[in-house]
Image (cartoon, coloured by chain):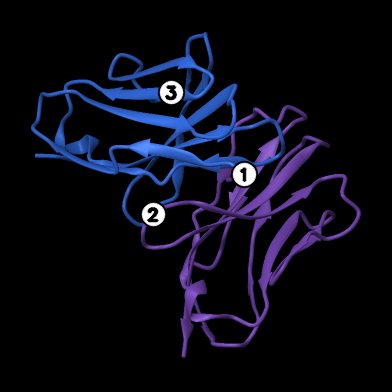
Amino acid sequence: GAVVSQHPSWVICKSGTSVKIECRSLDFQATTMFWYRQFPKQSLMLMATSNEGSKATYEQGVEKDKFLINHASLTLSTLTVTSAHPEDSSFYICSARRGGAEQYFGPGTRLTVT
Amino acid sequence: AQKITQTQPGMFVQEKEAVTLDCTYDTSDQSYGLFWYKQPSSGEMIFLIYQGSYDEQNATEGRYSLNFQKARKSANLVISASQLGDSAMYFCAMREGWNAGNMLTFGGGTRLMVKP
């Protein structure tokens, strides 16, 4: 089956620092990757759609300069949370589309900003 | 208006019984896809089942089946013979349009708890 990995699985950082989260499709090429954010006991909210070799498309209300997305290759997309603040603490999940109907989700990254 | 509505925040079911998780959707597109995902406490999203808007038969995958009622715009998930490992959050999601690269919109989720 299709496997998507995320690294790190959890991270604690200090307020004001930046954190990079990687999303990799391990056994397929993903032309499109998606980044979601999930607060405790809430649903997933799409942050941005990332296409290989082009700029990400951000959802309304998501700050482009704060959440930097780079989709450098067909198997890797990165999300960098710049100048993180405690309110950025959340569960970040990526997904990748292989070409069929479903999206394959990564295991998620839990970010805690102190 | 909410595109995906899951009206049951939490549900209990007895082990080995069947359970139905409700999902209604709102779209003006003729072509769309409906998905169900399971999210255990570990956080990962596990794909369960998919129904395309033009699929004439209800989708089935093992113990999971999707009760697709197009006129009512509902796509309920039925889990037969519940197991303790089925305890998790369940999300219904929709993708609108032809393009498989379109985004998914998720419902608020239903927490299912299976009692031994």
Residue drawn at 20 percent across, 37 percent down: A87
Q: Chain of mark 3?
A: A
- What is the spatial separation of the Cα atoms under label 1 and label 2, in whole angstroms? 23 Å
Amino acid on which disc 2 is placed:
Gly
Determine whether label 1 and label 3 are within 8 Å by CB. Answer: no
Q: Position of residue A104 (x, y in %)?
A: 56, 41
What's the mark number on residue B3? 1
The answer to whether A59 is drawn above or below residue B49 in the figure is above
Q: Which chain is purple?
A: B
Which residue is more in the foreground, B113 or B105? B113
Q: Which chain is blue?
A: A
Q: Chain of mark 1?
A: B
What's the mark number on residue B43? 2
| Tag in front: 3 or 2 | 3
Which residue is more in the foreground, A15 or A94? A94
Q: How many marks?
A: 3
Callouts 1 and 3 on one subunit: no
Callouts 1 and 2 on one subunit: yes
Q: Position of residue B47 (x, y in %)?
A: 59, 52
Q: Earlier in the sequence, mark 1 or mark 2?
A: 1
| Tag in front: 1 or 3 | 3
Crowding around mark 3 (Cα neighbors within 10 Å: few <14, some 14 to 19, many 20+) is many
Residue B104, located in which quarter of the rendered image?
top right
The answer to whether A114 is drawn above or below residue A69 in the figure is below
- What is the spatial separation of the Cα atoms under label 1 and label 3, in whole angstroms? 28 Å
What's the mark number on residue A77? 3
Callouts 3 and 2 on one subunit: no
The answer to whether B37 is drawn above or below residue B85 in the figure is above
Residue drawn at 70 percent across, 48 percent down: B34
Report whether A100 appears left or right of B17.
right
| Tag in front: 1 or 2 | 2
